[in-house]
Image: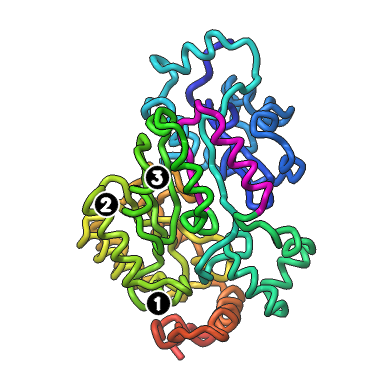
Amino acid sequence: MDKPVATTFCVAPWFQVRNENDGAKMVCCNMRTRQIESANQEPLEFLNTPDNIRLKRQLHQGERAKDCAECWRAEDNGRTSLRQRLNGVLTNNTSSVDDTWLSSYFKHKKNLQSDAILMADIKVGNTCNHSCVMCVPDDSSLIYNDWRANPDAFFIKEKLASDPEYLERIKLTGYANRNYKQYVKSILADTRLKYLKLLGGEPLLDRHLLTMLKALPEQQKRNLSLYIITNGSQDLIQTKNFLGDFKSIKFSVSLEGTSLIQNYARYGSDWKNVSSNIVKFSRSSPSDITVHNTLQTTTILGFKELAEWTRKHQLAMSLGVCHEPYYLSFSSLPDHVRAKVKDSLKEADLNIIQNNIGDEASWPISKVIDIMDKTSFNHEHYTKFLQYIKWYENGKKIKPLRHIYPALFVDKNQQVM
C-alpha cells in the first residue's frame, strides 16, 4: 500500500473499537452514528465492515471524511483533535507515520482489512453510584431509575418522543450484562492490545473487570496502558496496586467543583472522600492523574474555587464545555454570571492539558471564553433550566442551588430574584 497522508490519516478505523452501553460499536467517541447491528459483531468483524473499509480508504488517501467532522473542526481552530491524540498513542506523538512501525506496516500491507485490535475504548455499562446533574440514563443506573420514577418531566418527554424505545433499550446495560462480559473478554484476548480506555457508569465498581485485568499475563500487562475515567469515589492507590504492573495506569477524575457544589452536582458523591483519593494518588503518581471539569450552568460559579484547589495540589486539569443538554449549556447562563465567570477564567493560573484522551477534548481557556462570547443567553433555555433544577432537586437531601448560587436565579429581565 502507499504511505498514508499524514494530515488525514487516523489509527482509529484501523486498530480501535469503542462500544456504547447497548453494545453498538464505533471506531471512536467522536463518531456519533449508532449502528445497532454492530452490537452482535466481533471487534475485527466490525472494523472490516464496508463502511469502515470506506473510511480507512478516505483517510489514508488524504480525503477529509464527513464522519470525522469534529476532528477537522478542532484542527481548523488550532486545537489538538482526537485523531491527532490517538495517532500519538501509537507513534510516540510524532506527526507522521515516517520512522514509526506504521511505515513498515503499510509498506507490507496488501489491503484495507484490519488484523489487530491495538486500542479499545470500553464503556462498562451504566452502573454507577452517582446521579449527576448533567447525566443521562445511558451513563448512570441511578439516573435511569430517576427517569423511570418521574416520566412526566419535559426533557424525558422530549427524549422519548424522538426515541420511544430509549429507556427499554438501556434497561439491562449494567456491567453484569453477559454480552458485555463476553465483549470485554474478546478485547483482552488480543495480546497485541496497547491501549485500553475504560469509562462507564463508574468502571471501578466492576470487580469482575478489575479481576480480569489483574489476571492478564505479566508480559501482556507490561505492554498495555490503561486510561480510566472515574468519579473518584474509589481508592485510586488501592486500585492501581490491585491491578499490578501495567505499562501505565492513568486516571481522569471528573469533578464539578469543590465541597458543597461537588456534592450537589454529583449526587451521591462525598467531597471529603473524593478529594482525599485524588490528593493521595497525586502525591505518589503526580503525572498519572488529571482532574476534568465540564463547564455548565449549575456549577460554573464554582470554577474559581476548583481552580484554586487544583493549583494548591499541583494537579493537571482538562476542561470541557457542555453543549447537551441545551438547558445546562452557556445559552442558559445569565449575562451577569457570564461576565463574572469570564473574569475568573482569565485570572485562572492552571495547568490545563490538551493531550488527554477522554470523551471530551480539553479546551484552552481562551477558546472557552470565545465560545461563551458567541453563545447568547436564551430565555427559553433558561426557563427549561429552572424546570430541570426543580426536577433534579426533588427528593434529594441537598442544599438547593438557589441557596448555593442565588445569582443564577433571575427574572425575565435578568435581574436576580
Question: 225 and 76: which one is in front?
Answer: 225
Q: What crowding class fits label 2: few (fewer than 14 Cα within 10 Å), some (14-19), or many (20 or more)?
A: some
The residue that mark 1 highlights is 336
Q: What crowding class fits label 1: few (fewer than 14 Cα within 10 Å), some (14-19), or many (20 or more)?
A: some
Left or right, 191 with reference to 42: left
For mark 1, give the secondary structure: helix
Q: Distance between the residues labelled 2 and 1?
A: 27 Å
For badge 3, the amino acid type reads Leu
Residue at the spot 64% in from the left edge and 68% down from the top edge: 144
Q: What stretch is highlighted in magenta?
A: 177-199
The residue that mark 3 highlights is 243
Asked whether the beta carbons under mark 3 and mark 2 sit within 8 Å of each other, the answer is: no
For mark 2, give the secondary structure: loop
Where does the image place residue 309, in percent across and percent down from the top left?
25, 65
- Quarter-of-image position of residue 148: bottom right
Where does the image place residue 319, in percent across and percent down from the top left?
39, 55
The quarter of the rendered structure image containing the N terminus is top right
Does the magenta run of residues contain 217? no
For mark 3, give the secondary structure: helix
Q: Say if 6 sits above or below 337 in the image.
A: above
Does the magenta run of residues contain 188? yes
Label 2 or label 1, whichever lies nearer to me, is 2
The residue that mark 2 highlights is 351
